[in-house]
Amino acid sequence: MNRLGALSQTNMIMDTVESLNKAQRMFIEAEQYGWGLAEGHVPELMGPIMNEQALKGVELKFLIPENLLSPDMSPSATARNIEARGLTDIPAIIALTEKEAAVCFRLVGGRMDYAGFHGKDPIFHNWVKDLFLYYWDKGKRA
């Protein structure tokens, strides 16, 4: 909460489809890492993208609901740079690469809002990275 000012140099994306497309594009353009925090399964369309990126050496980390976590989560058995962990409560949706970041929060009633913030500003990027790593450390391994 103390660092919410980091959102000041971001773009607000109000459209759900635009927000999802932005996250997909981010993962396609990742060169070093792509990290995500999602409230459900990773979309099927992302499977081939994740496999291709993993084969290029991009580090992929995903946090998903703990009840969806299984030992065979990796899209490809040969990809060693893909890791998934589970959380009992998903506080936000995050897409993060070395180039940019995006985050969506829950609405007051608890439903996830797919409208969110996106940006390349280093302060915002570091805030989202710290948020992801905070929950990554709490995540349960498959």
Image (tube, rainbow, N blue to C red):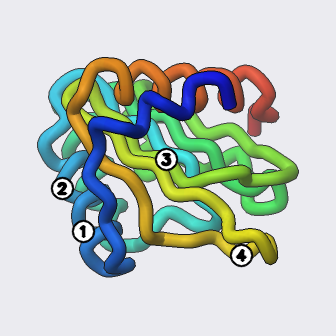
Q: Using the image, tell me which numbered label, if any, was put on residue 21.
A: 1
Sequence-first disc among 2 and 3: 2
User: Marks 1/4: CA distance?
Assistant: 20 Å
Is residue 107 depicted above or below 81 in this figure? below
The residue where tag 3 is placed is 94
User: Marks 2/1: CA distance?
Assistant: 6 Å
Q: Residue 107 placed where, x, y %? A: 68, 70
| Residue 57 appears in the rendering | no
Residue at 55% in and 54% down: 93
Q: Name which residue type carries label 2.
A: Arg
The residue lying toward the viewer, choosing from 17 and 79, is: 17
Q: Name which residue type carries label 1.
A: Asn
Residue at 43% in and 26% down: 80
Is residue 120 depicted above or below 73 in this figure? above
Secondary structure of the residue carrying tag 3 is strand
User: Marks 1/3: CA distance?
Assistant: 13 Å
The residue where tag 4 is placed is 111
Quarter residue 99 falls in: top left
- Give left or right: position of 24 versus 112: left
Residues at discs 1 and 4 in contact (Cβ within 8 Å)? no
Q: Residue 91 placed where, x, y %? A: 72, 51
Residues at discs 4 and 2 in contact (Cβ within 8 Å)? no
Secondary structure of the residue carrying tag 4 is loop
